[in-house]
Image (tube, rainbow, N blue to C red):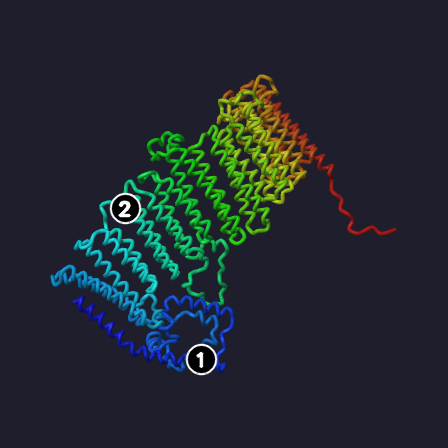
Amino acid sequence: MIELIALVAFALALSAFLNGRKTRERLDSEVAALKKEIARLTETGGVAAPIGDVAQEQAAAVSQRDGEAAIDDDEGVDGLSASAREGARIFGNAEALDPESASGEAVAASVEATPVDMATARQVESLESRLGARWAVWVGGIALALGGVFMVKYSIDAGLLSPAVRLTLAALFGLLLAGAGEVIRRRAVPVIANEFQNAMIPGILTAAGAVTLFGVAYAAYEIYGYIGTTTAFVLLAMISLGTVGLSLLHGQALAGLGLLASLITPLLVSSDEPRPWVLFGFLSVVWLATLLASRLRRWMVVPTLANVGIGLWGLAYVTAVSPFEAMPVAFALLVMLLGVGFVWPGAAETAASGAPLPEVTNRPIAVAGPWEKLFTPAYAAISVSAAIAATVLALIFISPAVSAVSYPVTEFFVVIAALAALGAWRTNAVYSALLSAFGAIAGIGSLTALSGVLAYLDPSLAGVAPEIVLPSRTATLTALLLATVFVLFGAFVLARRLREHTQFSILWAGITAAVPVALTTMSFLMTGNYAFDLPHGLFALVVGGGLLAFADWLYRRDSETEGLDIAASLLVGGSFALFVIALHAWTDGLVTTLALALLGTAYAGATRVRSWPILPWMTGAAAIVVLGRIAWEPTIVGAENLGTTPVFNALLPGYGIPALLLVASAYFVRSWPDARMRNLLQALASLFVLLTLAILVRHAMNGGVLDSAVPTLGEQSIYTLLAIGASGVFMTLDMKSPSPVFRYGGMALGVFSMLSVLSAHLFGLNPYFSGELLGRIPFFDLLLIGYLLPGIGYAGLAWYARGKRPPPYVMALAVSGAILAFAWATLSVRRLWQGENVVDWKGFLQGETYTYSVVWLLLGVLLLVVGSRFNAKSIRIASAALVFIAVLKVFLIDMSNLEGFLRALSFIGLGGVLIGIGLFYQKILSGVGVTRQPSATPPQPQ
């Protein structure tokens, strides 16, 4: 029953179309009358040509957008027919117009049309129009295709016809559908093509015919065995390619159908022996045909799906066949990349012509910036899908998870190089450039990191990570050749397109700097000779020099080009990184550290002859690299090669020479306009000087051994004295050459040293808690360097900072000095009574307890005198605090622990000192007196 209904529906549709030819003749006469009326009005001057560039441009855009679905001019209609107007009135809520009024209103509209009118969206389509004009066509096409299938099934089930006759009738039915679609296309009214492009009756009929023919060919091969494998493959390919060709007349949907048929053809026609060249050759032809059709019609969806299809077929072949041949897949990928670069989208840089025009509103329209435009190119889906497919398959070629006939290093190299070439040749292929860089880095990492070096670095990884049996020379050559390719492509882009495509050129400058550095580094680390590697060092030196020379050439050619500083800075940064690799490849140990410091100084010295903004930053980068080497190996030359002689050992040049070179670099850029750079170099120079002094002290105080042992009080005291001295030096430098580095750096050192006093000197390393021996010679012992000298240093620094630094900072320094003086006096009393071991478990003697009171009171009085002499309120407050502590001790401790004469003497001494302090303050306050107020009235003249 379904088959009969389908046949009757098709017959009725065809009959209605043939009967409509008479209506067409009447419509042609009406159109001719409209043309004559328009010509008459134009001749009499009743119509003025539209003026205004904006109107012309938008009219051209609209006509270009609608012209894709128009038919030949000799069969077209210049205006809406009577039936179309009536349909618009019924289904589109528009008013019916007679021919005369329609012609007059059309002419008036052409005269008075504005850009807003021309960009107005079409009327909202009614539900009745959707059901009658669109869904009916779609369902009808599906019904026709199913009708053909069901007709063949019915004849088989009923046994009415032989297989040959069935296939013949089905093929004729498919050809009849395709022919009917072509006839209707030639006779169709243009308004239908404009309004219902996605529900065109000719395209639906042609698609149904193509499906029927495809099914006939497959049944003849698979079910009845009338044709062989080769014939079936050729027939299916011809049907699918023919469908793609007919899509030029019937739209993108038919092209998608033909593409789908082409992609499933190899699945339907199987062979005992896989022929990858035949498979990927056929897919390349289908892909190219699809791309050509897309180029003519400016389609985007179908070529994107074609790229995905190529990628999926390549992925299925590479993962399913073992071992696989990489060359056929690489050939298909190259065809795809060449097609994307030269056929479609090619050099297209504008939005798709089918894009709707923006609505005219009073709201401001967001304008895309240059970087946003760079990463949102026209037809991006085509180039992105092709780039992803090429990158993924190229990486799978060299993956240890698959097996190839011969290791496909060449195919990997060719595909990545072709992808990079596409990214450099076309500015709209920005994602191809990025993915090629990613593919190169990931691929070289796969070639090198999985070749056994991981097990060398960490023996626990032996047997865990898969390994690739690949000669190190092959991996090295591949990495260096790919690095060269990216350098050449980057030079091409910067030389040709820096002025016109600034952002694109900057992106390629970054790729040119980053990719060679990454590839060379991986190749050297994984396959190089760490003692001396001539190939890697020579390559890094040559390419680094080339990047530096190319940056200089760009500045000489046109120094005013926008974005030149950024692009050249990236190139200079790449050159620096390559020079670092060269130094590591050719040198080792102390020589490498000194060479890196000299390299940084060379960039700073270059500021005298070149004003490139990036040059001083390379000096800072060199200092950071040196710090990294120091963190990796603090001994510079290795612990076994480091001597035990204090000061004069490998640490002196290893730390001291870079410090001196950084000081010289900071001097070179003292007049550099960028204050941030000046401050950075000053800070790095100061850091290296302090680091040099600290490491030499550590080496000397620790018996020539640099380890993580906790420092002694003597060593920590030297660090504290160095911090105090450096803070004073920074203060002096800040007075002569004001700099935030000297100002805040010196204060930070002071605060750090004060914190170390509270944590280390008073608690962590205090001999009273640690039990460290003080030494045999009184006064010239550990207490001298640990407490008295730092206390004097803080006092001197506080005096020097008065008026130069904030008062709270000065007061903190003075209080720190007073605290250290108090600690020295207290521990000295304990040494006097207990000897060189002043540990807490030894307890206290009565004479020792009394001596503490005396010493604290005397120290309080001394601080009071000093505070008054220098008008230092903070010292006087410290004196008062110390005296208060002494008072508490006398009343709380001496009263209970002392006996007899000592107890009385303690209180007598305390009373005398307190009375003396009171008398001292009374004299000071009396001497100050009351400040006389000035007279309120001026003196009278005499």
Front one among 69 and 735: 69
Q: Examine the rendered structure and indicate whether residue 79 appears above or below residue 714.
A: below
Residue 746 badge: none
Mark 1 surroundings within 10 Å by alpha-carbon count, few (fewer than 14), some (14 through 19), many (20 or more): few
Q: Amino acid at mark 1?
A: Ala
C-alpha separation, residue under disc 2 versus residue under disc 1: 65 Å
Q: Is residue 623 above or below residue 156?
A: above
> Residue 574, position in %: x, y?
51, 41
Task: Note whether residue 616 is visible.
Answer: yes
> Can you say whether 420 is above or below 649 in the image?
below
Q: Earlier in the sequence, mark 2 or mark 1?
A: 1
Residue 709 drawn at (x, y percent):
49, 25
- Give the labeled residue for mark 1: 39
Q: How many marks?
A: 2
Quadrant of the rendered image containing residue 797: top right
Can you give x and y, in whole percent of width and height, for residue 908 in the image?
Answer: 63, 25
Image spot of residue 804 (x, y percent)? 66, 39
- Residue appearing at x 45%, y 38% in the figure: 480
Q: Residues within 10 Å of mark 2 (few under 14, many from 20)?
A: few
